[in-house]
Every structure is written in C-alpha cells, then in structure tokens.
Amino acid sequence: MLAGTLVSMAATALVGVYFVMGSYMGYISHLSPQETAMNQEAYESVARYLEEQDQLYMTASASRSISQVVRNISP
C-alpha cells in the first residue's frame, strides 16, 4: 500500500512538472526579441563578473603557500 501511494505521488509530481515546464516554455517562446536581448545582456554581464571573480580567486590562491591555505581551511 505504501509503495502504491509513493508511486502515485511520484507520477502526480511528474505530471505537475510537465505542465509547469509547458507553461514556462510557452512564456519563453512569446517573449519579444527586445526582452530576449535584454535577458541575454544580463546573462553576459553576470558571466563576465563571475569570470573576473574566479580569476581574482585563482590569482590570490596561487600567490599563497600551501601551508597558508591549509591553515585557513582547518577549524
């Protein structure tokens, strides 16, 4: 009985996700080109920021010795 309940709940969740994704894809497909361009510009801006932060982190990590890094990680 428990297995049947769990299977039916999982099936219901999958159907729910299917409808939610269908609605979202419909929304995305009806976006105007201007909104799409603005979203793309925002994504590119975030990607540039993350790449810069990653580069700064890698530079800072490379300049430290292994013992300093281990001391910062240890509780």
Image (cartoon, rainbow, N blue to C red):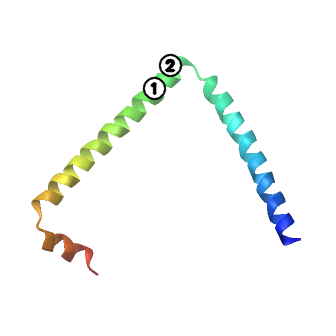
For residue 45, side relative to residue 18 (left or right): left
Taking the spot 26% from the left edge, 74% from the top edge, the residue there is 73
Tell me residue 64's x, y (percent). Answer: 12, 64
Residue position for label 1: 38
Of 25 and 2, nearer the camera is: 2
SS for callout 2: helix
Q: Please provide percent x and percent y for residue 54.
A: 26, 49
Q: Is residue 61 above or below residue 67?
A: above
In the structure shown, which secondary structural element does the residue marked by tag 1 occupy?
helix
State the image quarter where residue 49 is shown: top left
Question: What amino acid type should be assigned to the residue bearing mark 2?
Answer: Gln
The answer to whether 58 is drawn above or below residue 6 in the figure is above
Q: From the viewer's perspective, is 42 left or right of 10?
A: left
Q: Quadrant of the C terminus?
A: bottom left
Badge 1: residue crowd in 10 Å (few <14, some 14–19, many ≥20): few
Q: Residue at x 73, y 42 (%)?
A: 18
Between 7 and 69, which is closer to the camera in this rendering? 7
Residue under label 2, please give it: 34
Q: Given the image, on which type of amino acid does mark 1 rest? A: Met
